[in-house]
Amino acid sequence: KGGFYMKLKRLSKILLLASILSLMIGCANTEKVDVEEKYKVGLVLSVGGVNDESFNQSAWEGALRAEEEYENVEVTYLESNGEADYTPNIETLIDMDMDLIVGVGFQVADSVKEAAETYPNQAFAMIDSSYDKGEEIPNNVRPILFNEEQAGYLTGLIAGKMTKTNTVAWIGGFDIPSCTPFYTGYEKGAKEANPNVKVLKQYINSFTDAAKGKVAAQQMIKEDSDVIFMATGGGNTGIIEAIKEANGVKGIGVDMPMSYLAKDYIITSALKNVGEGLKLTIKDYIEGNFNGGNEVKYDLSNGGVGYEVTDHLSEDLIKYVDSKINK
């Protein structure tokens, strides 16, 4: 299931290679011709850019690891300045004869779905989105999903143990399925670790606005929060600024290890290993195990999510969180 169109594509490549070899044999020219088959993977990034220090960056780094580990893979990406860029970017990658096209982020999902229907012989993956329940997933699409709730839960345990004011905060970009579950888990973990804790929540309705992130964080700090989970994409830079300007406030990063951005202030990060999920998807594709038409979910059981260990965490706290993972 889902492999027929890939076999057709491989067959066409094999025929092309055979033609090249025939020309080499029948030609007196002894110049070497590189006929190694390359699998081309193209990413359509969501708004925020490749260096968003969050979702897009994690996906691109995973693609680069795949290119490094699997010699027959070439990766590229196209950035998007807005929703209107998603479909044209997909069309551009199709024109570039990509073997696998990846929509990075829920924002790109509708464009991927439309393109998958128009180009049934083109392989697609969509990160952080899927089809509605009861709706059949096309054979040429693999939805890649993550359990954000579990990652949020682990960092909530840490926040609940480390708060001194018994008030912690969570700031998200949008109330959407790939963002809000971080809060759900964060709140559960914080209250499990500290029954007296209060968990504040706010959305800034943006994944790019650093100014909105900073204002939201300043408001949370005024309300006595001393640990702030940031899940606002590019807005996180503003949240970090507010944390640095405050007294005794710490931050929790998201998606990828973020402590390097402010090692004195970021105590941990809720890891969503987007890059690893994408790398494994590329591996499945080149090995003929793509299996379109099925969701692939990454969680604590397979290393798809986790938390960042930093010097801010005591050995006892790490043991406490790891014991929860083991359970």
Image (cartoon, rainbow, N blue to C red):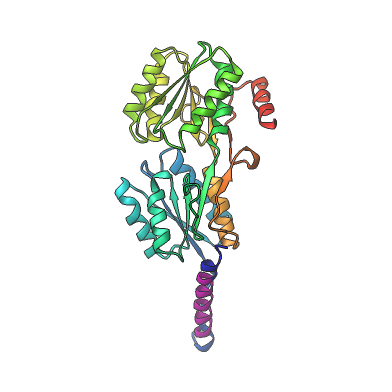
Residue 300 in sight in this render: yes
Quadrant in the picture for residue 214: top left
Residue 268 in sight in this render: no
Identify whether 240 is placed above or below 178.
Answer: above
* Residue 256, horizontal then vertical, whole percent: 51, 37
* Residue 93, horizontal then vertical, whole percent: 39, 60
- What secondary structure do most residues of the magenta stretch adopt? helix
Identify whether 29 is placed above or below 157.
Answer: below
Q: Is residue 14 within the magenta segment?
A: yes
| Residue at point 51%, 67% (across, down) | 5
* Residue 223, horizontal then vertical, whole percent: 41, 13
Quarter holding the C terminus is top right
In the image, the segment drawn in magenta is 8-23
* Residue 246, horizontal then vertical, whole percent: 41, 15
| Residue at point 36%, 22% (across, down) | 216
Quadrant in the picture for residue 225: top left
Quadrant in the picture for residue 196: top right
Quarter holding the N terminus is bottom right
